Amino acid sequence: MKQMGLTLEKFDKVVALAGNPNTGKSTVFNRLTGLNQHTGNWPGKTVSRAEGGFLYEGVRYKLVDLPGTYSLLSASQDEEIARNFILFGQPDCVVVVSDATALERNLNLALQVMEITDRVVIAVNLMDEAERKGIRVDTRSLSRDLGVPAVPLVARTGQGIPELLTATHAVASGRLRTKPLRVEGTPGVRRAVSLLSRQIQSLYPDLPNARWLAIRLLDGDALIQQAIRDGELDEFVHAAGRVDEGAGVVSAEGNA
């Protein structure tokens, strides 16, 4: 890995870094990007946004540090930013940094990210703390059960960073096909999701994940309903897949 300079206009792949607060996400970000970082605010928001770059296997990666959140249900500005970036920005990979000492709570966010995108890597950080507390985390079984790579990590010392890079590169490049665990629900729920997904897809053919939107609508998400009524969803869909600071999304295709 080579950490790139501050010129982030040119990149091949985009990786988003998600995670609960206090999981060591910033330490992972610093490990991957070193001092090669740029900070500012998300467009139209007062929430801080950090970006950095690194070169791995000849591929220029742009790393975007999303706000620390416990969920993607858009109950706060941080959650809204993280959700919109993952859904509409379509990063090539989302690395979810989780706390090995509180994995059950942290997996809530991981499962929500996996509902939106297939391209997920779970970075199980603070493995040394878990060991000190007598907690054993079997990342191999976790990876098998979740259907995405789970990498043991001690970001503070750098232990596991090479393996995290390998897994991220494999998922981002498409060399590793993941099969994320998703809750299917009852036959009635599945039929409703399928029907509504088709209707949404006909209205928004460029929407990256109609299934996720259908689930949120069936769950009574008032903010999603409002976004449809106000035409805000239309704006996000049309902004997806290209650099658009106004919408707060970054192209998954890179910006040559």
Image (cartoon, helix red, strand yellow):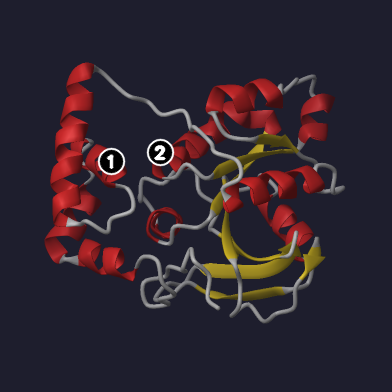
Q: Residue flagged by tag 2: what amino acid is it?
A: Glu
Q: Quadrant of the N terminus?
A: bottom right
From this view, report whether residue 5 is shown above or below residue 62. below
Q: Residues within 10 Å of mark 2 (few under 14, many from 20)?
A: some
Q: Horizontally, is 191 left or right of 106 in the view?
A: left
Residue 18 visible in the shown view: no
Give the mark nearer the N terminus: 1 vs 2: 2
Q: Are marks 1 and 2 in contact (CB under 8 Å)?
A: yes
Residue 232, image quadrant: bottom left
Q: Quadrant of the C terminus?
A: bottom right
- The residue under the point 68% across, 43% down is 167
The numbered mark at residue 89 is: none
Query: Which of the two residues, 244 or 198, is positioned nearer the viewer here?
Result: 198
Q: Residue flagged by tag 1: what amino acid is it?
A: Arg
Q: Position of residue 168 (x, y in %)?
A: 65, 48
Q: Position of residue 29 (x, y in %)?
A: 70, 58
Query: Which of the two residues, 138 or 78, is positioned nearer the viewer here?
Result: 138
- The residue under the point 36% across, 65% down is 240
- The residue under the point 46% across, 56% down is 82
Residue 244, image quadrant: bottom left
Q: Horizontally, is 84 left or right of 229 in the view?
A: right
The numbered mark at residue 211 is: 1
From this view, report whether residue 32 is shown above or below residue 149. below
Residue wearing tag 2: 115
Q: Position of residue 138 (x, y in %)?
A: 71, 21
